[in-house]
Image (tube, rainbow, N blue to C red):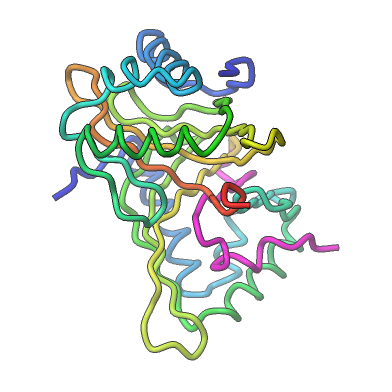
Amino acid sequence: MTKRVSQISQATADWYARVVSAVDSRDLDAFLAHITDDCTIQVNDALPVYGKAAYQDAMVRYYGAFDKTEHEILNLYGDDEHVVAELLCHYTPQGASKPVTMPAVAIYDRNGDGLLTSIRLYVGGGVMFEAFTGAVA
Amino acid sequence: MILSSLRTNQISDDALSWYGKYLEALDQRDMTALMAMVADECTLQINNNMPSYGKAAIEADTSAYFAGFKSTQHEPLAILGNDQEFAVELLLHYTRLRGDVFSIPCVSIKSRNAAGLLTSVRIFADTSPLAA
């Protein structure tokens, strides 16, 4: 079995588990409570999504593309301000009978209040994150 | 290799020096120097592709990778972790064989053993521009 890495504090690991749980349970309010008003999200080299309102729109599109998402946390690197999560993303497309699984890395920057200011996702097969790869006016 | 853009570094000076040599070996295509930094049982995986297992396979795959481009230049932006397990966020600048240049952002996660040799390299990026 591959050794698992967790370099962040238990408090931050618990926080991250809550973030992931909010995403997977589609509790948009709970998720958005973890980000600043000016948070950015970028997938690979796509134009970033800027700000909470645009992020909310992107999340609605993201949920619309999949019946279910499940994020499996493999390893956590960094510290409590800069967190790197190595993940398996198990995504079931709308109408599909089983999930597609892709490995991915998410890098998070947090401010002094623990809120997310930047999220950067790195994944092959970026089609899973198409909701975040168009510029939103 | 461009080190001037490194804004966050959590590894020691020794490990950073080692990593700089690793990037130099990659960008100068010094296979001997590169393989000297890799453990016999190292694995290399890009996204969800089948991993390359062991030094011989990694050397073969790296040779094929080098042959596909005129040159590469690695520009690390952040190194997060410790000297044995760390993640690098970087820009990879490629010069294609036909001469045009493009860049992709990526993350490379590295594991090193007690002797400082790489035992695992996992790379996460949208690699579709490489095939264009």
Give A17 or B89, whichever is nearer the viewer: B89
Residue at 59% in and 40% down: B105
**Up-down relation of residue A119 to residue B43 (above or below):** below
Image quarter (top left, top right, bottom left or bottom right) of the N terminus of chain B: top right
Q: Quadrant of residue B92?
A: top right
Residue at the limit of the structure toward the right, as seen here: A137
* Image location (x, y in percent) of residue B118: 26, 27
* Image location (x, y in percent) of residue B24: 47, 16
* Image location (x, y in percent) of residue A43: 61, 53
Residue at 75% in and 54% down: A51
Residue B111 located left or right of residue A46: left
Give A29 or B57, whichever is nearer the viewer: B57
Q: Which residues make up the magenta segment? A: A113-137
A133 is within the stretch colored magenta: yes
**Up-down relation of residue A116 to residue A54 (above or below):** above
Residue at the limit of the structure toward the left, as seen here: A1
**Up-down relation of residue B10 to residue B105 (above or below):** above
Residue A2 located left or right of residue A104: left
A59 is within the stretch colored magenta: no
Q: Quadrant of residue A99?
A: bottom left
Residue B124 located left or right of residue A5: right
The count of marks equals: 0
Q: Quadrant of residue B121?
A: top left
Residue at 45% in and 49% down: A105
* Image location (x, y in percent) of residue A131: 65, 68
Residue at 63% in and 52% down: B132
Give B81 or B103, whichever is nearer the viewer: B103
Residue B32 located left or right of residue A63: left
